[in-house]
Amino acid sequence: MKKQGSVRLPPKLSADSGNEPSLQGIWSGTVSFSLVAIPVHLIRAVEPGRVSFRLLHSKDYSPLLRRMVCPDEEKIVPPDEIIRGYEIGSGKHLLITDEELESVSPERSRTIEIIEFIDMEGVDPIYYDHPYYLIPSKGGEKSYSLLAEVMRRTNKAGLAKFVLGEREYLVAVKSTAGALSLITLHYSDEILPDNDIAPEEARVESAEKDRMKKVIREMIAEFKPDKYANDRRKKILDLLKKKVKEKVPVEAPEVEEEGGEGPADLIAMLQQSMRKVKKKR
Amino acid sequence: MAGRAIWKGFIHFGGFDVPVKLHTAVREERIQFHLLHVRDQVRLKQQLVCAYEKVPVPPEEQTKGFESEKGRYILIDPEELEQVEPEDSRTIEVHEFVKTERIDPLFFERVYYLEPDTRTTGYGTLAAAMREMDAAGICTWAMRKRSYIGALSISGKTLRLNTLRYADEVIPVTSLDLERISLSEKELKIGSDLINQMAAPFQPQKFENEHLKKLQGLIDKKARGEKIAILRPRRVKPTSSDKLLEALEASLRKVA
């Protein structure tokens, strides 16, 4: 368990830090619809691609971590010594505590209350912001399964607002392969107008349009995201294959607590990529 | 007014080239806070620190490595890294067309508006063709030293480009280890009825970011030196499994 400090970082910050275990909860609370309440944890649904580099200290090969540092003392500041400030003049701040922040919308800070159910197909993808998963807390497994299953059957998603840290999110809770996913949505006034983007009276070349439509028709397919293996990933794996042969890996000094993400199993990943290459032939 | 153009390229497919410029399509509004040291109220900086020595590490002492097994790293030189970075190309290559609703929302990342870059007819023609075919183009391109996968779509008269996440960036549901729970047909039937009763069209304009105004109100109050009343967050009692059917029935009576 991580120590709970006086400042909870917004989910994007903690999701991007890159060294937290992927299934660590960002938030815990309740999802409710009408009189049904489901205890849940919010966890991330995306993580940086598996093949990524770690930044290391060149002196001792210890991995680097992102931490808040006091510039006067050049020292790491523990979470319980950090407070949020709103700048009112140069260097002058109003201090805002988590409790005060939570008091702004207390009814929404621990509950994701579904107000209505919508057709997800009716949501313009421009509204999608960031995806998460919800997983049931102890005792919530049954009502969780029920909500996931009935939303799958009715092809609907729940619309809710909830507050996390400094922000209030408009979210869609939907069923994804038996699980509940939560997608934060942009507010409509965050969507920039597009009326000055395309010309008012766009000219259409009708013979060319027919040729384009013919090509589009020939190129219709089912979306299979796996097909687009990251090119970079392949190149990195090739590079690593080469390096494994010529260089002995360096060893990082052991550090108590604060373990990084589990080690990426290079050999397994190489084998997997080889299989994929073979399959393609 | 949409943001200024951030990149230029050509949409390329089946012998067609349509020159476009990318514009940001979304601007988030938020109140900016700083993180301070509680003792002296000095503004803190986020820095990279050595996990072992616990001290900030300057850029010249940073190096990159790949963890081959726990605690062991293969060091990579910056020149070698350059080899794996994609070369910038100006081509947004469309590989196939799909139904937009077949793309799982979990994959959508960022969205851009596409502006025609020349006064030719390509843009308007492509927009019309895609509208009539009701399809989105799955495409790849490289910009700012990164390779992207994206979905090209049409909305109104504007072409849009959504960046998509790579398949290995989306955590699969199977890794969540969810328990399979059996549900009775009655529970499922009442649950479905309840959802249908609570159904509404998606009207985003209905939802304002009220919190933003309230938060500004709190800051103004503090600035005037007023005390903030601390309100405890509302906690809802979870519905226990044996009370689920009861709660569903009561809900349905309430909304019907």
Image (tube, rainbow, N blue to C red):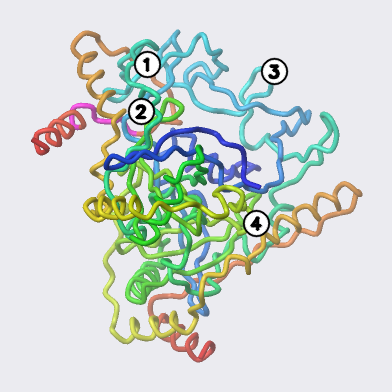
The quadrant in which residue A141 appears is: bottom left
Q: Position of residue A81 (x, y in %)?
A: 68, 34
Distance in Å between CA atoms under marks 2 and 4? 36 Å
Q: Which residues are magenta?
A: A262-268
In this rendering, position of residue A39 left or right of residue A75: left
For label 3, the residue is A73
For label 4, the residue is A189
For label 1, the residue is B82
Distance in Å between CA atoms under marks 1 and 2? 14 Å
Write down the chain letter for disc 4.
A
In this rendering, position of residue A23 left or right of residue A169: left
Distance in Å between CA atoms under marks 1 and 3? 36 Å
Q: Which amino acid, by three-letter code, is at mark 4?
A: Asp
- The residue lying at 66 percent from left, 49 percent from top is A166
Of badges 1 and 3, the one in the foreground is 1
State the SS at label 4.
helix
Categorize mark 4 by other alpha carbons within 10 Å: few (<14), some (14-19), many (20+): some
Q: Position of residue B12 (x, y in %)?
A: 34, 39
State the SS at label 2.
loop
Q: Earlier in the sequence, mark 3 or mark 2?
A: 2
Q: Which amino acid, by three-letter code, is at mark 3?
A: Glu
The quadrant in which residue B148 appears is: top left
